[in-house]
Image (cartoon, rainbow, N blue to C red):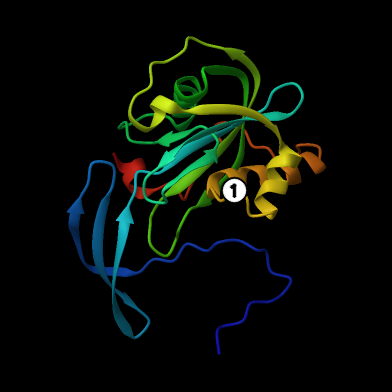
Amino acid sequence: MPESVQPDAELVDEPFAVTVVESHEKFHGHVWDVRRDRFEYGASEISREYVDHTGAVAILALDTNERAMLIRQYRHPIGLRDWEIPAGLLDIPGEDPLVAARRELAEEADLSASEWSVLADFFTSPGGSTEAIRVYLARGLSATTTFERTEEEAELETRWVSIDDIVDAVLDRRVGNSILGFAALAAQASRSRGWSTLGDTNAAWPHRSRRGAED
């Protein structure tokens, strides 16, 4: 049977170091890579392939009516123009995540914000990717210069939607973007607690994607 944990123990992800016997880059992509690691775990030696990701930031930008700025754009792997929140890769070496978040909010939504907080950190697919995302809550919004957009972003749409309406869409399975769903549910829960769960913009991020942190 799986090892049991005491029910009153704190619910927290546990760092666990293993001995990596071999690690090879099997595919080098424009945005991310694929690696194959062979490592020791218990009495076994295991081989796993995974996406070596830079990590990313996302922004839940709220106006004075607590409506979030959503964007819709085409995503080729799923063949959908899905609803999302502004987000972007941490692919500039040495860039602070907050700086990246400010840039992405301006480039994708033509907005700047005077108030920033950390809403949540999460992994998109821990069984197959190193991607870790930090979601910021941005308030005190104002318009910025409109950016020229190309490729999938050329036909980008925007819409202001209340947190509750987003959550309804998630629960009704009308929208499926993981970052949007995670951010909206976290925001609804945090709001119910008077936003007391929000973190400082310099809050520690110990599980940031290795590739992004090491670049």
Task: Give the image location of residue 42, x and y in percent.
Answer: 38, 82
Label 1: few (<14), some (14–19) or many (≥20) C-alpha neighbours in 10 Å: some
Picture residue at 51% right of the left edge, 42% below the top: 82
- Residue behind mark 1: 175
Place residue 96 in its image quadrant: top left
Task: In the rendered view, tell whether residue 167 sits above or below residue 25.
Answer: above
Task: In the rendered view, tell whether residue 168 sits above or below residue 12.
Answer: above
Q: Is residue 204 visible?
A: no
Q: Is residue 176 visible?
A: yes
Picture residue at 51% right of the left edge, 34% below the top: 72
Task: Give the image location of residue 210, x and y in percent.
Answer: 35, 49
Q: Nearer the viewer, residue 127 or 167?
A: 167
Quarter of the rendering occupied by the N terminus: bottom right
Place residue 18 in its image quadrant: bottom left
Picture residue at 32% right of the left edge, 61% below the top: 50
| Farthest bottom residue in view | 1
- Residue 210 vs residue 85: left or right? left
Look at label 1 and name its amino acid. Answer: Val
Picture residue at 59% right of the left edge, 19% below the top: 113
Task: Give the image location of residue 120, x and y in percent.
Answer: 60, 44
Q: Nearer the viewer, residue 19 or 85?
A: 85
Task: Give the image location of residue 135, x and y in percent.
Answer: 56, 39
**SS for callout 1:** loop
State how many labels appear.
1
Quarter of the rendering occupied by the C terminus: top left
Task: In the rendered view, tell whether residue 2 sits above or below residue 151.
Answer: below
Task: In the rendered view, tell whether residue 100 sits above or below residue 8.
Answer: above
